[in-house]
Image (cartoon, helix red, strand yellow):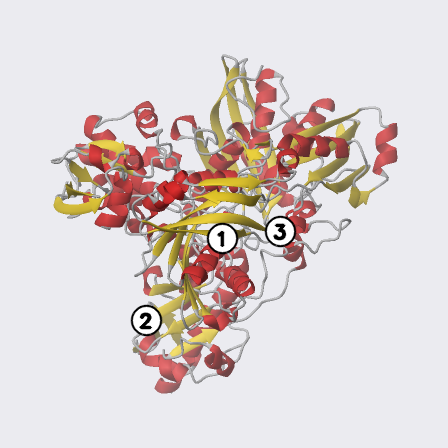
Amino acid sequence: MTSRRNFLKTSSLTTFGFALGVSSFAKDATLKKITPAIVSLEINPFIIIDTAGNITLVNPRPDMGQGSTQAVPSLLAEELEVSLDKVKIVQSDGKGKYGNQTSGGSSSVRALWQPIRKAGAAAREMLTQTAAKRWNVSATECFAQDGKIVHRGSNKSFTYGELADDASKLEIPKNPKLKEAKDFKIIGKYNKRLDVPERVTGKAVYGLDVDVPGMVYASIVHSPMLHGKIASIDDADTRKVAGVLQVVRTERPMPHRKSEAVAVIATNWWAALKGKKALKVQWDNGDFEKTLSTQKYFEATYAAAKKEGINYEEKGDFSAKYASASKKIESSYETPFLSHAPIEPENAIVHVKDDGTIEIWAPVQGPDWALRDVCGYMNVKPEQVKINVTLLGGAFGRKAYHDFLLEACHLSKELKKPVKVIWTREDDITQGPYRPGMLSHMQGFVEEGKITGFHHHAIGESIAGQVFKGLKDDEADPWLTGEISPENSKYNFATASKISWTNVKTDIPVVWWRSVYASNFGWGQECFIDELAHLAGKDPLQARLDILTDERFRKVLETLAEKANWNEKLPAGQGKGIAVFRSFDSISAACVTVSKKENGVNIDKVVSVIDCGYYVNPDNVKAQTEGNIVMGLTAAIKDGITFTNGVCDQTNFHQFNLMRINETPKMEIHIIDSGANPGGVGEPGLPPIAPALGNAIFAATGKRIRKLPFDITNLA
Amino acid sequence: MAVFNLTVNNKKVKVDVEPDMPLLWVIRDFVGLKGTKFGCGMAMCGACTVHLNGQPIRSCQTPISTVAKNAKITTVEGIGEVQLHAVQQAWIDEQVPQCGYCQSGQIMSAVALLKTTPNPTDEDIDAAMSGNLCRCGTYDRIRRAIHKASDTMKAGAGVGGGK
């Protein structure tokens, strides 16, 4: 823990009576391995209790809909013995003293579970000690309740505010006693999210809703082939548009490369957009017409599937055992590139001021990463930058990629005034970055009715390799291999198993998308387990249980079987499919029921089970899992992103369709109370959805689907 | 530029804008009500849904010049000015929003549905709400919340204020 003295020196919030900082807790090798850059465990959240008794939490996780504005303060309120509405939340601004501040990797609760509770418990102990001293009694005779320290014998009490000043002079206890789970009043209990009312009355402020005095608006013409060079600009018609102020050459700074662009600056965004539509830009696209092609990319992945990949982990001599196996199969499972398509498009306001300081208002998932990127791009120091993080109107990984923010930086520096950049939906869909399309090449064999040999060859672009560079060509992307590592896939393949990978590069920009590669590889792994179960002549649930000893996995599957009535006899034309996948420290399984309908199937119901260890609010776990069902089904049966002749074939929601309410099946969520350390909640529900659907379709129709997305109304 | 006199949430406002400017941007950037959202710009997502004389419309595809002079425009800010509209309350009770960005549009579509169909079936809800996308995937809760609001309104409570 930091000493109080150190904290006071660095914090700008020290005008309050009592402040407490807590630094990192023990590093967890497993977490690091799975999500190295998303979950850095160096966190340092701050809690301030002022002399009026107000409690402020500097929340280091922006809210994009995942509920961090409830989850994080709940951890504090629980230990401080105050109700949730007593904790005021201030969003952290990216400065280093707050440590990791990125909403990503389903990290909010699992990373903050210990440190925020410890900070709350430490504060509670310091307040208790202060009160005990004033009364000249033992601290054991005092307890915290509703923002007060109460003396048990006399029923005397002090409010936290009355104690804050004196308490702040104490040393911070290094190992405060945390509450036991049985005493939890908030954690694990249903509580309404306090910021829902502002989200149903139009009062919630997202990035798009911020206005800054004197700002101008920018709409940007991006390169249709993403990386083309500007050959010529004809802005004659643009300049005739009322409200248009200027047309300026600019750039789109992606993490790994910059693209040329042209910005239309106007007094309002509608005028900027009209000006953009009137602008004629000729592009020199080099070879991109040939190279930007998802068809060519996937051809390269299928070619790679015929060759050996680089081994990540091998048990037994898989290749030899597979060669001599008598009952074996192999098949390839494909998942498409996908756009995140948050309903709030990318946007940012940046004001590069005369004194060289920069102020930002933007919906970003991580103010710390945004600060790092802005400082690097603008060549300024962190103390020269102020980031105001707004609410995010959806993100799903997209708003931790700061091209739109750096565009606004570039323009504001050039124009010397605040600039609001708003992307169109077409910018969002056609420019990326995208979830990478991937191929899982699977091999496996069965012996004596059991799945005993299994090989997952993960093929495609590396996010870490493309976005962050620095990976050697033979170095495994930890996201890519981590998702299917034995830590996540607990199946025991008795004879041999192998995980291998091949990096197939593309110029199409990629980035993490909800559940990252788990969203790709769950499809191959769990559909292929189903294929092997049938090869072994076993029920798909039993075939899984036969090779699982892990108690949590078994409990999740057994609960799913019970809740989804797995063993019921179904009429012809109806089928159920299951899948289970572990990601972000949580285990989730799903059962999908489908019925034949004309040439396709109808999705009747989805039952989902999640073991995420300790959780804060069961209703939010359910909400996130419901969201994962919808996003997982959308990824399976709606549109993927394709590039043909250098350009994205989809431009808006008429071509990149998302699932709508009329297509949404009934759903049911069950939470396992395992009492394990908290796992993620925002993402783990997604990976089992598509394979459970694919397996259900096989059960109902006998048709095995191996390529996503597919048309659920026409399986012929 | 041209001057338009509008009635937004029962208040008279005057704006001086280009005639082809969509109502969405007039409401957001000239009237200053930010609750109505931009999502796609082609009436595919419903985030911009407002009421024009009580009918739900996609304001991103409605040029201001096509809005009749005496038309009444209602936005999410106008349905529950005195007390929350039953639909808004149901949205809170069922904890519908995640990010919440699309919910203004969802709520305006739901309010319009319940005016014409006070007792909707799931099929009615699906039909009336299928123009509103939610990327967070709150659809199942939206169905539940609309049924709940329907029950509340049939009991004669919570129709909001301001109209």
Residue at 51 percent of width and 43 percent of height: A232
Q: Is residue A443 left or right of residue A286?
A: right
Q: Amino acid at mark 3?
A: Val
Q: Amino acid at mark 2?
A: Asn
Q: Circle 1 sits in a helix, a strand or a loop, which is it?
A: strand
- Label 3 marks a residue whose chain is A
- Asked if the residue under mark 1 is in contact with the one under mark 2, i.e. CB atoms within 8 Å, the reply is no
Mark 1 = which residue? Answer: A250
What x and y, as percent, mark residue B100? Answer: 36, 45
Q: Circle 2 sits in a helix, a strand or a loop, which is it?
A: loop
Q: Circle 3 sits in a helix, a strand or a loop, which is it?
A: helix
Mark 2 = which residue? Answer: A54
The answer to whether A55 is drawn above or below residue A514 in the figure is below
Quarter in which the C terminus of chain A is drawn: top right
Q: Is residue B59 visible?
A: yes
Q: Is residue A15 left or right of residue A8?
A: left
Mark closer to the chain start, 3 or 2: 2
Residue at 47 percent of width and 62 percent of height: A60
Q: Is residue A365 visible?
A: no
The answer to whether A272 is drawn above or below residue B108 in the figure is below
What is the CA distance from the residue labelled 2 to the residue labelled 1? 46 Å
Mark 3 = which residue? Answer: A467
What is the CA distance from the residue labelled 3 to the residue labelled 2? 42 Å
